[in-house]
Amino acid sequence: MIRVLLADDQTLVRDGFRSIIEREPDLEVVGEAGDGRAALDRARRLAPDVVLMDIRMPILDGLEATRRLLTVPDHPRVLILTTFDRNEYVYHALKAGASGFLLKDVRAGQLTEAIRTVAAGESLLSPAITRRLIEDFVQAPPPGQTPTPLAELTERELDVLKLIARGLANAEIAEHLYLSTATVKTHVNRILSKLGLRDRVQAVVLAYETGLIKPGQPPPHSSA
């Protein structure tokens, strides 16, 4: 059973999400919070697997609550919720370690699948809105040599990181680079370990921050 905490200052929004989530046999809402401070308190007491975190909340906003929550050991995964499709706070939340974000008008099936995805340790990278937000709020350095944070990666690992930053899943990266999915997974794990990153979301952020990927570049095409 996947345990979910709802953090949103609007009761109607929480009620709607609870109704959707509790229809699923493998999902359970273990608590609710109307502000960021209450979200932190309930997360510590209830030990949810996933926190659905709104950004704009009283007392303590969702961004600061996410930062604090993700500094403790064995923290839950955080899925950011927002009504805005272009919100700089979302980028900072992803950089802090949130596993992704959804718009509040998401369809029921997308919401429940997103909860399962982040609970399984994955990140939400596929929606185009995620990449657009990152491109909007990252200032890439001038072109030049491979930036220092990426210097210890091999050429193949850099290739994999570029494709991660384009939102490709492991199977798609494997097809593009003519590798097995298991080999790609090994490369991804090594990249995260070498760079000290929590997950693929932070890998995407770093790829843009270091200029490895430039905003507006077209998606990769198959080399076949």
Image (tube, grey):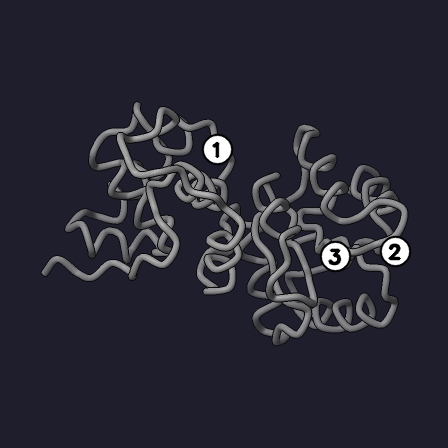
Crowding around mark 3 (Cα neighbors within 10 Å: few <14, some 14 to 19, many 20+) is many
Callout 2, which amino acid? Gly
Horizontally, residue 224 falls left or right of residue 170, namely left
From the image, tell me which residue sits under label 3.
54
Q: Quadrant of the N terminus?
A: bottom right
Residue 129 appears at what percent x and percent y? Answer: 51, 64
Secondary structure at badge 1 equals loop
Q: Secondary structure at mark 2?
A: loop
Residue at the extreme front: 142
The answer to whether residue 82 shows anywhere in this view is yes
Q: CA distance from mark 1 to mark 3?
A: 24 Å
- Dot 1 and dot 3 residues touching (CB under 8 Å): no
Q: Are marks 2 and 1 in contact (CB under 8 Å)?
A: no
Q: Can you identify the residue that label 2 sits on? A: 34
* Left or right position of 196 against 28: left
- The residue nearer to you, when weighing 15 against 71, is 71
Q: CA distance from mark 2 to mark 1?
A: 30 Å
Residue 131 % position (x, y): 46, 57
Residue linked to disc 1: 197
